[in-house]
Image (spheres, rainbow, N blue to C red):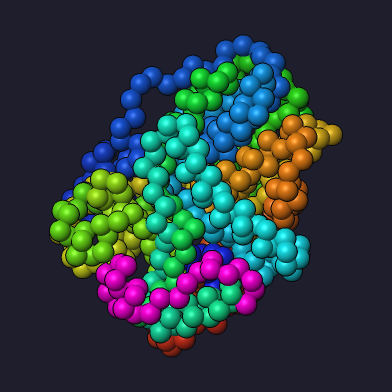
Amino acid sequence: MRTSHSPNTLADTTGSTVAATPAEGTPTARQETALWKTDRTGQRRAALDEDITVDVAIVGAGYTGLWTAYYLLREDPSLRVAIVEKEVAGFGASGRNGGWASAIFPISLARVAHFHGHTAALDLQHAMNDAVDEIGRVSTDEGIDCDYAKEGFISLARNPAQLARARASVKATEDFGAHGQFKFLDAAEAADQVRATSVLGATFTPHCAVIQPDHLVRGLAAWVESHGGTIYEDTPALTMESGRVGTPGGVVSAEVVVRATEAYTPEFPQYRREVAPLYSLVVATEPLPADLRSELGLDGRKAFNDLRNLRIYAQSTADGRIVFGGRGAPYHFMSRVDPRFDTDIRIHNKIVDTMHDFFPQLRDVPIAHRWGGPLGVPRDWFPSVGLDRSRGVAWAGPYVGDGVATSNLSARVLRNLILDKPDELNSLPIVDHRSPRWEIEPFRWVGVNAGLAAAELGDFEERITKRPSKISALLEKLTGAH
């Protein structure tokens, strides 16, 4: 269960009481709020309180649901589209992620090619690259101010094992035919980009942008509403079946029901073993002085991480903060999702320690926000999108933490499938992919948490041996994830 942002196989964003690092005391309520959501104002949208009939009913007002509504209404403004949301638009990963819109696919292109062929794998990568640009195009065209900045991302090699993996991964992408997807940087070139400690080299890809995630949510939601779509908040879907979504306030009848529930999918009994929710946790600093950002090479908007096995991710925000996140929080028995798991003292402290290991100069910079949330993982780590036309049920996701761009791509596929629109995207490997179900408990709990522990152990192994981890190589072979 490799969880790095490594391109080493031809392509690769969110436990139970929060606490500050020991020197900071008890965190405030503001510190426990996702950075992106601190400026939310206005009342919540009305809940559904009657039976309605629409053409397309979407369950979930995150990126998948909002992008799907956007593309459907752009294509056919006469469509009746309704979205039901248990909380508020963007409540889940869409409003709480690390702000990367990347072309990373969770499993290797080599593994995609094994099942779907070499050309199909390259087509998928090209579509992922385009999805990054498509978010920027829509944001510009529709006037959505989400701080979109496409400067790529750099994965630093900070020990000999990571350096070996960086060289091998870039060679592998070139040998596969994904020319220019990643570039190898030597130590001087890498340090000139991000001035972290112990930099020996890096890989760089231009196919990544950073955004303010919640602003994108709000911009899309406003567009959908202004073009005839309806969003019902505080409206949990109690049942989700062919032609019908049951809620406490009424039934939504529709020709097509779209499941856009990502990590919350296991809350529906029929899908309990389809998705395992894993938690990713994040911190954000106070804004850094301009001279300190320049000293660290963080005065741009490039996304960055290093090539460790237990995934981390970071960016510089438009207002000069450092957002730094990572995996490692435990999977919870029976796929439980609970707001209490959004913060974890042990994992948040590790994330802060890792950030300080990158940049010792940040030790005196206050941590302003700590947050987290669940992301959805299918058993084979392979995102999917599809439509069962005989039942009138469509779905997209889960995305294994790389959903900002993948959800955009999936929504365009859903538009095509629902409206029977011919398009080359309809033949991508993600379309109609069916992942195997996760094991029953307690085997799921044991396996997922063992995988997380093994990824962390792999990083320890690499620090000791200075060679790529055999443990992580085995996990990658078993899961295809990287």
Magenta highlight on residue 471:
no
* Residue stretch rendered in magenta on the structure: 175-198
Residue at the limit of the structure toward the bottom, as seen here: 465
Residue at 32% of width from left, 67% of height from top? Answer: 193
Above or below residue 334? Residue 199 is below
- Residue 268: x percent and y percent? 65, 37
Which corner quadrant holds the N terminus? Answer: bottom right
Residue 464: horizontal and vertical position, in percent? 40, 86
In the displayed image of the protein, which residue is found farthest to the right? 390
Residue 6 makes an appearance in the image = yes
- Residue at 52%, 75% in the rendered image: 170
Q: Which residue is rendered at x = 45% and y = 76% of the image?
A: 184
x and y percentages locating residue 78 in the rendered image: 67, 18
Q: Is residue 204 above or below residue 97?
A: below
Task: Using the image as rendered, state which of residue 264 and residue 333 is in the foreground.
Answer: 264
Tell me, yes or no, if residue 277 can be seen here.
no
| Between 248 and 363, the one nearer to me in the picture | 363
**Residue at screen point 39% across, 49% down:** 149
Q: Quadrant of residue 35?
A: top left
Q: Quadrant of residue 244?
A: top right
Percent from the top left, x then y, of residue 250? 63, 16
Query: Quarter of the image containing the C terminus?
Result: bottom right
Residue 193: within the magenta?
Answer: yes
